[in-house]
Image (cartoon, grey):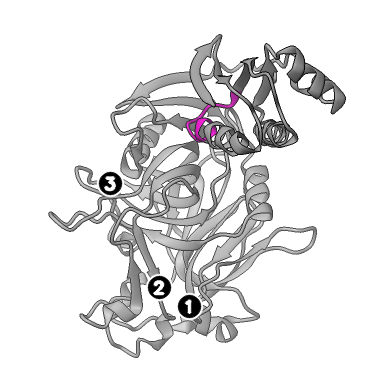
């Protein structure tokens, strides 16, 4: 079988030539999957030159028909031959696959969606309900991690309900003593919290809001924030030379959009690569020894030494600031080459699934993802800028980025800087 591709009135057309039997059904499925991963959510299967279709061929078309419907996309069969049309009628699915499906009409709004391009990435901005600045609270003393002196006494039990989100080192458990052997990276967003246990299980654990059940994390150190996001940025990096956008570039676009000095982020995106580190054991075992000492660092931290997690979905929570105050500088680090902006970002990595285009609900997106897939890991994102061995920084392909201007509060919950 041959498959030719072209575009027609904004739709991605796959023109088949040959028999669509069990031998070729998987080939068609791979071709459709590649198109979906490339951002094509409206697909026509042109069967004008297909004289035979088996149940396997019909099955693969129906499979991706349902995949695209879940992300507000469409898949149609066009120009079927008589034999193919008869087979579809006998299966009573001709009315489903042959009907003229229009792209879903989105609710009209008096607010105009702004679109622009930046360094090969196209953006569109969807205003969210304005609720003032996001308020971020600092917990613990991350500077003590480098000296092996983090104390359980500084932990804070945090409930992540409603618009509360955050990241840091922590674990689930009845109290901090119960959690101490599992303390690792965590993030919380959209009514969900996920942790990377350091007890040897290596399987991320998560909690979802469910009626009276609310996610609770014993936080050793980190940042938590309350408040709604003011903008949703949809981005597509296909126009660039490599078809990716570095995380630092996405952060720069957010700063430009908000014209502020500090920003809170929630990102759900298809990844090209994720660069970062994950704790191997709980920091309570440091006993005053720096985890960064060589060669002991190998027992403490797992670093990405090459491009990893390509073609996955990443849920990223983070905070970025142009110039940290001395009181909060320990919570931030450099984001990459060529930028003075600093930040703190964690990512939970999930199997690939296509993301709907246009405006999205953050909580619905998070709950759908956590409820249908198991995360591979949770990691602290870093920029590996070593001259020769470095693997660079996290790169994304397309996705949704919720942003809002940020105020940072000190560890006593008193505002020390208003950064807008």
SS for tag 3?
A: loop
Q: Which mark is residue 279?
A: 2
For the point 47% across and 72% down, the residue is: 184
Q: Using a 10 Å C-alpha cutoff, classify the residue at mark 3 as few (fewer than 14 neighbours), some (14 to 19) or many (20 or more).
A: many
Q: Quadrant of residue 278?
A: bottom left
SS for tag 1?
A: loop
Q: Residue furthest bottom?
A: 287
Residue 138 visible, this angle: no
Q: Which mark is residue 214?
A: none
For the point 51% across and 24% down, the residue is: 2
Q: Is residue 323 above or below residue 231?
A: below
Give whichever of 189, 67 is nearer the camera: 67
For the point 65% across and 80% down, the residue is: 174
- Residue 407: x, y in percent? 44, 48
Instruction: Tell me whether circle 2 and circle 1 mark residues in contact (CB < 8 Å).
Output: yes
Q: Which residues are magenta?
A: 34-42
Q: Residue furthest top?
A: 9
Instruction: Tell me whether circle 2 and circle 3 mark residues in contact (CB < 8 Å).
Output: no
Q: CA distance from mark 2 to mark 3?
A: 25 Å
Q: Using a 10 Å C-alpha cutoff, classify the residue at mark 1 as few (fewer than 14 neighbours), some (14 to 19) or many (20 or more).
A: many
Give whichever of 309, 347 is nearer the camera: 309
Q: Quadrant of the N terminus?
A: top right
| First reached walking from the N terminus: tag 2 or tag 3 | 2
| First reached walking from the N terminus: tag 2 or tag 1 | 1
Find disc 1 in the rendering and name its residue: 198
Q: Residue furthest left?
A: 387
């Amino acid at each position: 079988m041959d498959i030719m591709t072209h575009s027609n009135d904004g739709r991605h057309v796959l023109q088949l030539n040959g028999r669509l039997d069990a031998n070729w059904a998987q080939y068609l499925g791979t071709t459709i999957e590649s198109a979906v991963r490339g951002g094509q959510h409206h697909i026509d299967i042109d069967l004008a030159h297909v004289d035979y279709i088996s149940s396997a061929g019909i099955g693969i078309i129906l499979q991706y028909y349902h995949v695209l419907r879940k992300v507000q996309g469409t898949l149609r069969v066009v120009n079927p031959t008589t034999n193919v049309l008869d087979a579809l009628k006998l299966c009573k699915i001709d009315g489903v696959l042959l009907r003229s499906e229009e792209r879903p009409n989105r609710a009209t709004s008096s607010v105009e969606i702004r679109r622009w391009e930046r360094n090969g990435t196209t953006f569109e901005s969807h205003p969210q309900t304005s609720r003032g600045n996001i308020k971020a609270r600092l917990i613990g003393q991350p500077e003590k991690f480098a000296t092996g002196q983090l104390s359980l006494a500084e932990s804070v039990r945090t409930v992540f309900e409603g618009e509360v989100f955050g990241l840091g080192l922590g674990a689930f458990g009845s109290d901090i003593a119960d959690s101490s052997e599992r303390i690792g990276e965590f993030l919380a967003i959209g009514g969900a919290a996920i942790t990377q246990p350091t007890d040897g299980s290596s399987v991320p654990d998560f909690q979802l809001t469910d009626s009276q059940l609310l996610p609770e994390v014993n936080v050793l150190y980190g940042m938590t924030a309350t408040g709604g996001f003011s903008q949703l940025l949809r981005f597509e990096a296909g126009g660039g030379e490599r078809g990716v956008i570095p995380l630092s570039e996405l952060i720069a676009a957010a700063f430009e959009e908000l014209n502020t000095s500090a920003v809170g982020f929630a990102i759900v995106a298809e990844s090209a690569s994720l660069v970062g580190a994950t704790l191997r054991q709980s920091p309570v075992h440091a006993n005053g020894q720096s985890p960064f000492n060589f060669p002991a660092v190998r027992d403490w931290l797992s670093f990405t030494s090459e491009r990893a997690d390509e073609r996955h979905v990443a849920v990223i929570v983070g905070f970025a600031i142009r110039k940290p105050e001395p009181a909060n500088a320990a919570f931030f680090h450099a984001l990459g080459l060529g930028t003075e902006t600093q930040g703190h970002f964690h990512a939970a990595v999930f199997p690939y699934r296509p993301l709907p285009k246009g405006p999205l609900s953050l909580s619905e997106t998070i709950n759908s993802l956590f409820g249908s897939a198991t995360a591979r890991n949770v990691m602290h994102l870093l920029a590996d800028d070593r001259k020769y061995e470095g693997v660079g920084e996290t790169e994304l392909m397309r996705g949704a980025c919720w942003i809002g201007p940020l105020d940072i509060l000190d560890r006593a919950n008193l505002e020390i800087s208003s950064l807008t």
